[in-house]
Image (cartoon, rainbow, N blue to C red):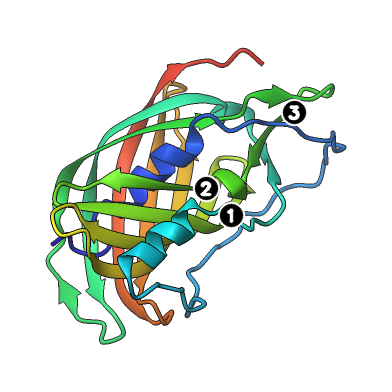
């Protein structure tokens, strides 16, 4: 059994960040000084729907997503491109709501390929579109398939040197052997990308808060990693 909150976030972000079609209307640049914003986790999430029978679940997965409209986000120049992460280090693991401190996983393999921006408007600003209609998939986790769907997504430039991505995702683990639903949960991930003095490297801090199907918090993990620049994009 995979522990909730362990590397779940990385796989779905890897699937989401690749292949997104971008388009945007130009917006006028602002000269107002930017203050660093603080983004925090939700206290509770909406309940998630989990069919009791696997056939019902697969049928629901095959239907088109009744999605929200696409969202378009501004991307700072220093983050534009393709970035690679090889591993991550979990530094904190806390049981909720008790607050009991658990043993962090530590360093673990966590490959991720991030792509930021493929559209530049007439003013030179890079934009990225997130499509909720495509934000569903599955990840092979050995004995189970993680069937995930992103319910909410936001990219915010919180300072000239930091960008925060918030994603709310539901997960259902299906046994590859018995084809039965083993567990369902949801999580909210906050990924903070920070510019460094090295233009070919960025720092990534991840905070993942796990919730049960009713939307009650169960676990909070903190991790850090670095990403290296792989390639520029033809915009």
Q: Which residue is mark 2?
A: 135
How much space separates mark 2 and mark 1, taking CA atoms? 9 Å
N-terminal label among 2 and 3: 3
Q: Which residue is mark 1?
A: 65
- Report crowding for label 3: few under 14, some 14 to 19, many 20 or more residues within 10 A (C-alpha): some
Give residue 117's position: percent from left, percent from top: 61, 29
N-terminal label among 3 and 1: 1
Determine the residue located farthest toward the bottom in the rendered image. 98
Residue 169 falls in which quadrant of the image? bottom left
Residue 152 falls in which quadrant of the image? bottom right
| 2 and 1 marks in contact (CB < 8 Å) | yes
- Residue at 47%, 22% (x, y): give it: 199
Asked whether, in this view, residue 208 is left or right of residue 142, the answer is right
Q: Is residue 189 visible?
A: no
Give residue 46's position: percent from left, percent from top: 52, 77
Asked whether, in this view, residue 31 is left or right of residue 232, the answer is right
Q: Which residue is mark 3?
A: 125
Residue sitting nearer the eye, 58 or 122: 58
Residue sitting nearer the eye, 173 or 195: 173
Give residue 133's position: percent from left, percent from top: 60, 48
How much space separates mark 3 and mark 1, taking CA atoms? 30 Å
- Residue at 79%, 25% (x, y): give it: 121
How much space separates mark 2 and mark 3, taking CA atoms? 25 Å
Q: Which structural element holds mark 3? A: loop
Q: Is residue 198 above or below residue 166?
A: above
Q: Is residue 111 above or below residue 174?
A: above
Q: Nearer the viewer, mark 3 or mark 1?
A: 1
């Amino acid at each position: 059994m995979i522990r909730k909150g362990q590397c779940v976030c990385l796989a779905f972000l890897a699937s989401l960040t690749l292949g997104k079609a971008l388009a945007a209307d130009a917006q006028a640049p602002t000269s107002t000084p930017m203050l660093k914003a603080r983004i925090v986790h939700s206290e509770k999430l909406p309940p998630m729907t989990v069919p009791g029978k696997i056939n019902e679940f697969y049928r629901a997965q095959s239907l088109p997503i009744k999605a929200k409209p696409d969202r378009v986000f501004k991307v700072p120049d220093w983050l534009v491109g393709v970035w690679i992460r090889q591993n991550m280090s979990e530094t904190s693991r806390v049981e909720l709501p008790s607050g009991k401190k658990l043993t962090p996983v530590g360093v673990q393999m966590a490959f991720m390929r991030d792509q930021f921006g493929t559209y530049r408007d007439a003013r030179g600003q890079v934009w990225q579109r997130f499509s909720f209609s495509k934000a569903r998939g599955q990840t092979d986790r050995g004995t189970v398939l993680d069937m995930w769907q992103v319910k909410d997504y936001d990219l915010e430039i919180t300072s000239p040197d930091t960008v925060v991505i918030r994603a709310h995702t539901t997960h259902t683990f299906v046994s590859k052997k018995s084809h039965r639903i083993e567990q369902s949960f949801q999580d909210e991930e906050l990924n903070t990308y920070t510019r460094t003095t090295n233009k070919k490297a960025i720092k990534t801090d991840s905070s993942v808060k796990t919730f049960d199907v009713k939307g009650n918090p169960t676990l909070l993990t903190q991790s850090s990693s670095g990403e290296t620049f792989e390639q520029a994009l033809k915009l």
